Amino acid sequence: MNKTKRSLRRRTGPKAHSRKGPSGVGFAEAAAYLAEIGKGFYARGWVLGTSGNFSAVISREPLRLAITSTGLDKGSLTPKQFLEMDEAANVVRGDGRPSAEALLHLAIVRGVDADAVLHTHSVWSTVLSGSHASQGGIALEGYEMLKGLEGVRTHNHREWLPILENSQDMLELGERVSRMLCEIPDTHGFLLKEHGLYTWGASLQEAKRHVEILEFLMEVLVRSGAAQSA
Ligand SMILES: [Zn+2]
């Protein structure tokens, strides 16, 4: 699929030395857009009960991310609730502390040069990541909506969504995420077992689109399975 493009991005880095995020987004703009994304995802039921977290790269050199602080209701997020953190998950702007999963965001932005990382806890991802865990992932194939994933041009595309065992040890889990991204660099996201979805993009818009596409497809899989057994 888009191996060539991604490999190229990995080598050159997307505007690697710009002071704003590689997509030209500063902290305030990223926080405002992420707050809107959070409210939309909450309304869809994808980030209930303070679950989920969102980030955007606002600088590569040095690495800086705007990220949700922990424990917030995503249905009423405001831009002031975002933190700026450095490459070691230290807060350099804002009050509060980043989500425990901040280390996973860092592993992803380093591993695939993503400029935005979005994490949801939907019913669909929770169900599928449990039921398919023994297979190590879920194959998404044949669906028109796959074309919403960056670089995918046909419904005949086969997207492999890896499933990783969940953990509360974020250092260990971050290392497993990094290894998986080395082994499957073309994936558009992954699932943590009975936990949720991580996906990303070269921009906030692209990452948001990837959540919508992957959540749609996971909902289709669960609902079509239920329809077949009815
Ligand atoms: Zn989570």
Image (cartoon, rainbow, N blue to C red):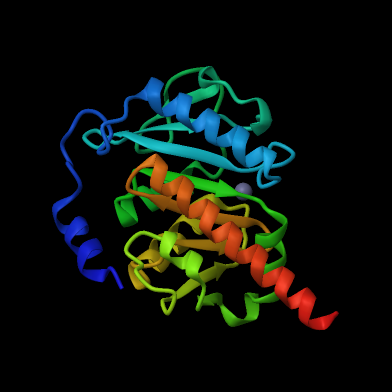
Residue at x 25%, y 62% (from the top left corner) = 6
Q: Is residue 9 above or below residue 29?
A: below
Where in the figure is residue 37, as x and y percent of width and height? Answer: 53, 36
The residue at 36%/67% (across/down) is: 152
Q: Is residue 111 visible?
A: yes
Q: Does residue 193 show up?
A: no
Give the total of numbered labels.
Answer: 0
Q: Quadrant of residue 193?
A: bottom right
Using residue 127 as the reference point, say whether residue 100 is left or right of it. left
Q: Is residue 211 left or right of residue 21?
A: right
Most distant residue in the right direction: 230
Residue 43 falls left or right of residue 82: right
Which quadrant does the N terminus fall into?
Answer: bottom left
Say which of 178 and 208 sits in front.
208
Residue at 43%, 48% in the rendered image: 207
Query: Which corner quadrant of the image does residue 73 belong to?
Result: top right
Measured along the vertical axis of the image, is residue 121 above or below residue 100?
below
Vertical placement of residue 90 versus 53, above or below? above
Front-most of 183 and 212?
212
**Frontmost residue, 223 versus 22:** 223
Q: Where does the image place residue 51, in percent across and percent down from the top left?
A: 67, 42
Judge left or right: residue 37 versus residue 25: right
| Displayed quadrant of residue 125 | bottom right
Give the image location of residue 29, x and y in percent.
39, 24
Q: Quadrant of the C terminus?
A: bottom right
Q: Is residue 65 above or below residue 129?
A: above
Residue that appears at 54% across and 52% down: 212
Task: Give residue 57's position: percent from left, percent from top.
Answer: 34, 37
